[in-house]
Amino acid sequence: MQARPTHATAVRPRPTAALRRRWPTALAAAVVALNVIASGSQDVADAVGGFAETLPLLPLIYLVVHQIGRPQATWPVLGAGLVAVFVLAAQDVVAASTVLVALAAAVLVWGAIRGTPHGSATFGVQAAGAFAFCGLALAGLAVDPDLGRYLVAAGWFCHGVWDFVHLRLDKVVSRTFAEWCGVIDVLVAVQLLFVV
C-alpha cells in the first residue's frame, strides 16, 4: 500500500502580521498624513523653507551611523537629530540647515582623519550623498520658492531612492529606518510637488 503524499496547506498571513512586518511603512504614511493635515494650506515659500532646512538631517544620520559603525544606533541618532532641528527652529539665531551642514562637514572630516568602520569606498559613497543632498537643500533655499520646490522635492525623492538602495543592501543604517525614511522621503516629495 502506497502512502498518500501530504501537501502543505497554504498559510495566509494575517493582516496584523503584515502590519507588524511593515510597521515602518505604516508609521511613515501616518507621519506624512499628520504633517499634511497640520500644515493645511501652507505657503509654498514656507513649505520649501521648512523641508529644505530639514533635508540635510537625512545624510547626516547616515554619516553619523556610518562613523559609529552600529546600525542599531540609527533610531537614537534620528531622535537626537529631530530634537536639534526643533530646537534650532524655535530659536531665530542660526538656520537649522546651516548647523546640519556644518555637522555633516565635521563628521566627514572625522571620517577622513580617523578612518571608517565600513572602509573608504562606503565612506566615499556616504560623502557623495551628503554633498548632493545638502547641496540640493541649500540650492532650494537660495533660489525662488517656485524653483526651490523642485530642487528640494528632488532632494527628498532621491534620498528616498537612497534609502531603498540601503534597505536592499542592508548596509549602514537599520533596515526599519531605511524603510521608514524611504517612504517618508518619497511622500514628502509628492507633498511638495502636488499638495503645497
Image (spheres, rainbow, N blue to C red):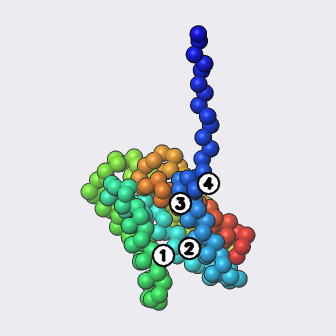
Q: Earlier in the sequence, mark 4 or mark 3?
A: 4
Mark 2 or mark 3, which is nearer to you?
A: 3
Give the structural element (helix, strand or loop) at label 4. helix
Q: Nearer the viewer, residue 104 or 166?
A: 166
Q: Residue at x 43, y 67 (%)?
A: 78
Query: Which callout, 2 or 1, points at the residue further toward the start of the chain?
Result: 2
Q: Residue at x 44, y 83 (%)?
A: 88
**CA distance for labels 2 and 4:** 36 Å
**Pointer 3 residue:** 24
Identify the residue shown where x is 34% and y is 47%.
119
Q: Position of residue 134 (x, y in %)?
A: 50, 66
Amino acid at circle 2: Ala
Depicted 8 relative to depicted 118: above or below: above
Measure the C-alpha gap from mark 2 to mark 3: 23 Å
Which label belongs to residue 97?
Answer: 1
Q: Which badge, 2 or 3, is on the more N-terminal residue?
A: 3
Residue designated by label 2 = 52
Mark 1 or 4: in front is 4
Label 1 CA crowd tier, 10 Å (few <14, some 14–19, many 20+): many
Quarter of the image that includes the N terminus = top right
Q: Which one is nearer the viewer's eye here, 77 or 37? A: 37
Q: Are marks 2 and 3 in contact (CB under 8 Å)?
A: no
Q: How far is disc 1 from disc 4 in space, using C-alphas?
A: 40 Å
Task: Check disc 3 and give the amino acid type.
Answer: Pro
Judged by depth in the image, the label closer to the viewer, 2 or 4, is: 4
